[in-house]
Image: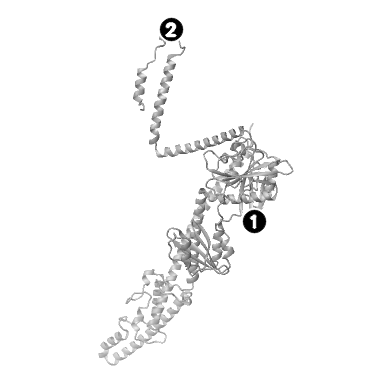
Amino acid sequence: MLETIEDVQVKKRAVRPVPEDCYSQAPLDTGQDKNKIFQDELITLLERANASRIDDQRCVLPASFNQSSCRRMTEDRRETNAERGRQRLVKTLEGPGPYETIVLPHGGGYWADCGGGNLSLPPSNEHQPKTYRHHFLGQEHVNLTGWDESQGPVLVSVKYEAVEDQTRVVLRLRTGTVHSLVPSTASPPLAIVKALKPELSLNVLEPVLCPRASHLIAAYDEHVLVSQYKFGVLYQKFGQTTEEDLFGNRSSSPAFDEFLNCLGRRINLKSHRGYRGGLDTQFGQTGEEAVYQVYKETEMIFHVSTLLPYTDNDPQQLQRKRHIGNDIVAIVFQESNTPFSPDMVASHFLHAFIVVQAIDPHSANPRYKVCVTARDDVPAFGPPLPNPPIFHQGPELRDFLLEKLVNAESACYKANKFAQLELRTRSSLLESLVNDLREKSKEFLYSAAPETPTDFPETPKSESGSGNRFIDTVRKALIARVRSQENNNNTVKKMANGHSENDPSQSGNNTVTRSGTFGKKSSPSSPVSSPDIHTQRLNSRVSESDCSSLNSVELENGADSDTGLESMSSSENKTCSLCLEPADLAAEITRLKCDKLHLLRQNVTCQREIKRLRERELGLQSELAAASREILRLRELLKDYSTKDNAPTTL
């Protein structure tokens, strides 16, 4: 039962200290001070009570505090594991040799391979990135795209192999690419795809029909190929059991230099023009030399710990760990038999270590023992180690190590941390490729079909390109029509005047005849004597129509348009060689409206451009004014400084 604070206070009141004069009369037999004993007992009791309350409070702490405490607990656990690993290595070194090359952590998390066939490699049935280039590109095949509800974008390549009487299929999903050879049948590609992946639910596959589609697909398949690698190289001396010891080696040894020469060639970073792997090639901040190698059309650069700059008063050597700690695979060179544990180096990126131990390094026939260790989520990778894993110095050791390093990095990409990033990248690239192929196919197939606007009929190119000339032509035709109407009016007037002079009783009929002559709309009460007035009115009406808004040019049934053509309806019964037919006139009016729309759009665009230029002009003027003020201020300062410098100094 836990003690409460009230119980502790009761015990404190029950046990009271004895006055000092009581103990001064006769010394104690035990020789101990009773006050000291009481204080110790009280402190112990208080500590127990506080510990009990802390235990009770740990389950009701806020979530934020739990997260921080968990983070601290994780760091403490990591430090504890590292300390335990170091103690285990120290304890191993206390025993007699020879020692194990790799000592796995006590908590697990890593696997090791030192030859002997105790580690089986997974079957190599994965899709090779260059399969499409070797078997499909430049040959007759079919590419199809689809979309699955659960798997997302789907891209399939199908090719019939006449020699083998088989069908080669490459199925690309966001989860990966599948390459398979199936017996040739009359089954459609959709059935073949569902036979390879029964969980797919897509019902339609669309063919890809656009230029250079095969090159885009080949580029997607080969985006996983890496042509540049960077690896770390650590130097471990005998008895070194911590990360600080590995990064703190200031100089190398002849055996280590001999191994580096076998691994690659030394280069001067300032004169290096190839892959640099994050090293400084201009100012020498990452050292002067590095190890470089070109192997099977791939560039490799090695971050060697002893070639990176050493920083005084920095036990962790962060300048070195900044490069090696961000690598994925590292080599650990041991000049003599000493154990290595993969948890010695704390890094989120390092997933695999290749430990190379020198055997008789100073003899005429130096040999090397190779062991491999990696995290549990990294699959095994080749080439397999021989039994025993001993190599002689020379091209055999170099080729094996370089091949092992490349395969190790490829295998590390399948670890949980890197696999999530790879899945995200592959999904984004595949979705972009499928959408791009679909759009290009639609453009390639349907680009020749004309697009008809829905708002207004299409204007012929010969007329839309010369809208202003077309308007001028219509103006001339309308002016000629008005002039002909005025001539007819004058003729009618003369005839009416002649009848009135001969027979005044016919004046009423003249009015009826005049009204019947001009049609449905009534004519002006007095005839127009000058045709120029009609011409000015027509020009003004046409210009006003061109500058009006878009709503004022809508052509409605039974409505008169605002283009200065009202007088045309009054002469429908008249025939003239310069007049147009009603159907042609309606078509020309429609084309005029289309030209007007184009002009209005150009006007809006020009207005926007003018507004933007004005805003830019105002901005430049404000900047110029600010610059002028700054120049004046600097001139005043320069004048003041010149005055102070020229002033005589008084002693």
Identity of the amino acid at label 1? Glu
Identity of the residue furthest to the top in this view: 25
Q: CA distance from mark 1 to mark 2?
A: 96 Å
Q: Nearer the viewer, residue 70 or 610?
A: 70
**Residue 610 visible at all:** yes
**Residue 268 visible at all:** no
Identity of the residue furthest to the right in this view: 364
Q: Which residue is found at the position 39% from the left and 26% from the top? A: 49
Q: In the picture provided, is 320 more to the left or to the right than 193?
A: right
The x and y percentages for residue 333 are: 64, 42
Q: Quadrant of the C terminus?
A: top right
**Kind of element beneath mark 1:** loop
**236 shown above or below 7:** below
The x and y percentages for residue 70 are: 45, 38
Q: Nearer the viewer, residue 472 or 612?
A: 612
Identity of the residue furthest to the bottom in this view: 502
Residue to which mark 1 is pinned: 297
**Kind of element beneath mark 2:** loop
**482 shown above or below 650:** below
Which of the marked residues, 1 or 2, is nearer the chain's N terminus?
2
**Number of other residues with Cα within 10 Å of mark 1, as a class: few under 14, some 14 to 19, many 20 or more:** few
**509 shown above or below 601:** below
The x and y percentages for residue 99 are: 62, 37
Q: Which residue is found at the position 44% from the left and 39% from the top? A: 67
Q: Which mark is residue 26?
A: 2
Q: Quadrant of the N terminus?
A: top left
Q: In the picture provided, is 64 more to the left or to the right than 390?
A: left
Q: Nearer the viewer, residue 485 or 47?
A: 47
